[in-house]
Amino acid sequence: MQYQFPDNFWWGSASSAPQTEGAAFEDGKGENIWDLWYKNEPNRFFNGVSATEASTFYKHYRSDIALMKDIGHNSFRTSISWSRLIPTGHGEVNPKAVEFYNNVIDEMVAQGIQPFINLFHFDMPVAMQEIGGWENREVVDAYAEFAATCFKLFGDRVKHWFTFNEPIVPVEGGYLYDFHYPNVVDFRRAVTVGYHTILAHSKAVMAYRAQQQDGQIGIILNLTPSYPRSQNPADLRAAECADLLFNRSFLDPAAKGEFPQGLIEILKQYDQMPDCQVGDSDIIAAGKVDLLGVNYYQPRRVKARLTAVDQNSPFMPEWLFENYEMPGRKMNPHRGWEIYEKGIYDIMINLRDNYGNIPCFISENGMGVEGEDKFLKDGQIQDTYRIEFIQDHLSWLHKAIQEGADCRGYHLWTFIDNWSWCNAYKNRYGFYSLDLKTQTRTKKLSGEWFAQVSKNNGF
Ligand code: BGP
């Protein structure tokens, strides 16, 4: 074997409640912003497909967990839907939801699959959004209570908790770039949303520690390295700004308990500081995590702006840099994202050298393919491109581990092809393909291959 991974390495995949469960209006679940937005604007979703049924995990969790086991999962990440557990966001707990999540967790444990549970995957309850969502500090407290409730209910069996998945994404999608509800374009409000998300994260971490359980609590961040076009100081500064805004805005508070000075300077310079209250910095300092999940799909390449900014346009991150298309870059032609395997190594080395070698794992990595049916042969998706993609990333990850990075596992996005926000079922990522009409799951070639990797703890 060429690449042997450390003992007890986590092999598995990741998903989330809103993207898999379906049963969006069943058994007392409250609405989340995706249910609401779909009602208002179904045209914003690829082929008009909603998450109402998604991939029916709510119904089929037991057989799905058997499929996980079949391809060698020793761990799996999903999330608890806030609006299923507490339909109005705070107050009454829904007993049907408690029963469902108990069943899922018990079944995973019984099958030898460690449950990694995340508490927020873009799915704000409507009742909370109606009072301002993350712009309102009351929502921060309601979230912390929801988190504490989850720890109490399920913490005896769940030993790996995550407060948020990719918390920068609702900031970008909902408040800057119009790809999540509530479709606001307003940098200052975006900053407030991000700031309150960090407070919510820290309060959840505090709630976990107050319960003195014996597990770990972390956060999952999409760390997208920012590569400058050149070593020209203007390009370097552009990359630094992108890194501060999109990576370090969450990484520094989560790993070091404070915001980077450079980010504060940018916000002050452009008059975009959020409303900070006395005591906030202590809360943020208490939010340092035990474990960091790293999602990595593609790099970000930037250059200094070539043109002057229109001062009448709303302030945007792109006032500070422009995206750069590197000639000769390798593309995933089926998704339109660059593939840069070494990025995974660069992230690990950055965490080793600049973040105290914080314990981490790859919590998402994967290759989306539109129209994947074209690779169907004899009833199976022959996704050799995905196997190659995973291998190439794992070999760079292996090198980082050899060089001392504290990486403890690899989860693919995703288990069974699932619903993905506005892209719905456009890009397929799973180890299993999903027939949307019949809900049949079929193992792809990559699923077979992964079972071997997990069994051999390497390849
Ligand atoms: C990640 C999210 C996932 C998932 C994935 C695929 O950033 O955490 O929730 O949706 O992206 O995205 P897409 O289907 O748009 O290619």
Image (cartoon, rainbow, N blue to C red):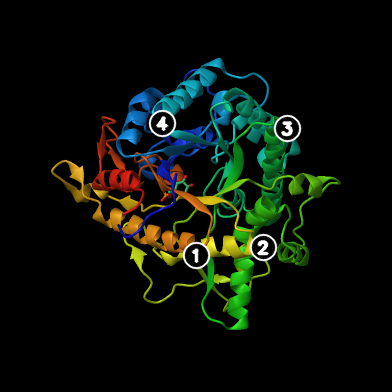
How far apart marks 1 and 2 lie (CA) works out to 41 Å
Numbered badge on residue 315? 2
Is tag 2's residue or tag 3's residue first in the polypeptide sequence?
3
How far apart marks 1 and 3 lie (CA) works out to 35 Å
* Residue matched to label 4: 112
Residue pictured at 60% horizontal, 31% vertical: 126
Is tag 4's residue or tag 3's residue first in the polypeptide sequence?
4
Q: How many numbered dots are placed on residues in this image?
A: 4
* Residue matched to label 1: 403
x, y percent for residue 274: 76, 52
How far apart marks 2 and 3 lie (CA) works out to 40 Å
Is tag 1's residue or tag 3's residue first in the polypeptide sequence?
3
Instruction: Look at the image and tell me in which quarter the C terminus lies.
Output: bottom left
Q: Is residue 195 left or right of residue 276?
A: left
x, y percent for residue 245: 64, 61
Looking at the rendered image, the disc whose residue lies closer to the viewer, 4 or 2, is 4
* Residue matched to label 3: 210
* Type of amino acid at the residue the image marks with label 3: Ala
Residue extending farthest to the right is: 278
Q: In this view, does 342 lie to the left or right of 91?
A: left
* Type of amino acid at the residue the image marks with label 2: Phe
